[in-house]
Image: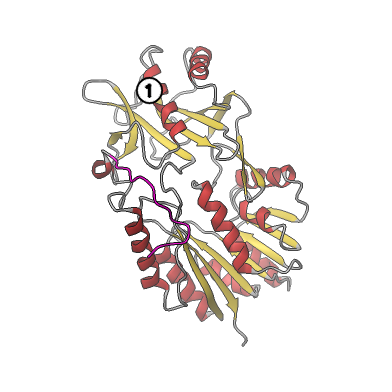
Amino acid sequence: MQTENSKTFERRSCPVVKECGGCQIQHLSYQKQIEMKQKQVETLLNKFCKVKDIIAMDYPYYYRNKIHATFDTDRKGKAISGIYQAGTHKVVSVDSCLLHDQRADNIIVSIREMLRSFKIRTYNEDTRNGLLRHVLIRTGYNSKQIMVVLVLASHVFPSRKNFIKALMKKHPEITTVVLNVNNKKTSMVLGQREQVLYGKGFIEDTLCEKVFRISPKSFYQVNPVQTDLLYNKAIELASFQGNETIIDAYCGIGTIGLIASDHVKKVIGVELNRDAVKDAINNAKRNNVKNVYFHNEDAGDFMIKMAREKQSVDAVIMDPPRAGSTEAFLRALTSINPKKVVYISCNPVTLKRDLESLVKKGYQVQRIVPVDMFPGTSHVECIALMSRTDK
């Protein structure tokens, strides 16, 4: 199949694709990749309605705006940085990844090269010795802003001022640097304690004509080009008339709800993560949006409470994690009886399960549109529009 927004471009290859395992289908041409994803979604979801053609990328490389590099040492004691081999904690040395923003990869290489002169050792998971564990970099696609998060095993950072000064000299494009302390034996990248070393401690970027604040722990889609298409397509499918009240469940920092706010009367954003809700409130203020109201609560519990109070909404937009929704959440959703449900899914397998549940609860699937958010990998995003059937 040939998608309407796919173009001819020079194909690139990765020297560590087999060793790394992060790009499961990078060895295929991009045309073959999208054909495979289209077939996968059709096989799983065609029983609900005919799946539309996948929305492909024009240029499927260097799209990630969030880059995480793990630091370690090789057998000769030399510092390396890269990506965990799939299913292991072995670090595959990577200087340039076909998925990463190239500015971020260049900064990571510079940090690694600076370690020796500043006598900074990389962290060893087994002995728990060393200082530098990870570097997280977040980049603004439109704003060009760059955040560097140095994840250390201790808050004691010798020569930190000189280190930051030297880093900024090499990369003046960096707009903020944050120190994150993670001194626990854990697979989690970020710890709880943070200190801003340079700049504001966050970056901003524009998505669908709205400006969003992105902090180290913020959930923000990693492919800004496709996210713009994804969210605009979701709004288009919903066909809002301007007088609706909607719920943005799993709202995170408020992205989809704030984007939808121009098309409806009222948006209720619900999110369990307190830090994300604070970011969402700031984002609403930053964009001067007056018709969005955020609640720090479990979305399922919130909707059950609404149902008890005989309240209803016209539509629910949901964007759950890869594990999908829960049966308790879906029961809560149907308890407020929205006319429409817009389900944004990053896992067609759990989407199929949840659609089956909603169909049993009185909803009909109207449209399914796949979106290639993660070229080179086997992952595929989908938007499903459901409407309530007349009983």
In the picture provided, is 116 more to the left or to the right than 271? left
Give the residue displayed 40% in from the left and 63% down from the top.
2
Q: Which class describes the residues within 10 Å of circle 1: few (<14), some (14-19), or many (20+)?
A: some
What predominant SS class does the magenta segment belong to?
A: loop
Whether 286 is drawn above or below 28: the answer is above
Name the foreground residue: 47 vs 208: 208
Query: Tag count in the figure?
Result: 1
Whether 28 is drawn above or below 193: the answer is below
Name the foreground residue: 36 vs 266: 36
Q: Residue 162: in sight, yes or no?
A: yes
Measuring from the top left, give residue 116's x and y in whole percent. 35, 14
**Residue pointed to by mark 1:** 112
Give the residue displayed 75% in from the left and 50% down from the top.
289
In the picture provided, is 186 more to the left or to the right than 289? left
Q: Residue 300: in sight, yes or no?
A: no
Whether 99 is drawn above or below 269: the answer is above
Q: Which residues are magenta?
A: 1-14
Give the residue displayed 34% in from the left and 37% down from the top.
83
Amino acid at circle 1: Arg
Measuring from the top left, give residue 108's x and y in whole percent. 41, 28
Which residue ends up furthest to the bottom in the rendered image?
391
Residue 9 shown in magenta: yes
Residue 310 shown in magenta: no
Measuring from the top left, give residue 10's x and y in whole percent. 35, 45
Which residue ends up furthest to the front in the rendered image?
8
Name the foreground residue: 277 vs 103: 103
Q: How is the image coloured?
A: secondary structure
Measuring from the top left, give residue 1's x and y in whole percent. 37, 65
Give the residue displayed 51% in from the left and 18% down from the top.
164
Whether 350 is drawn above or below 6: the answer is below
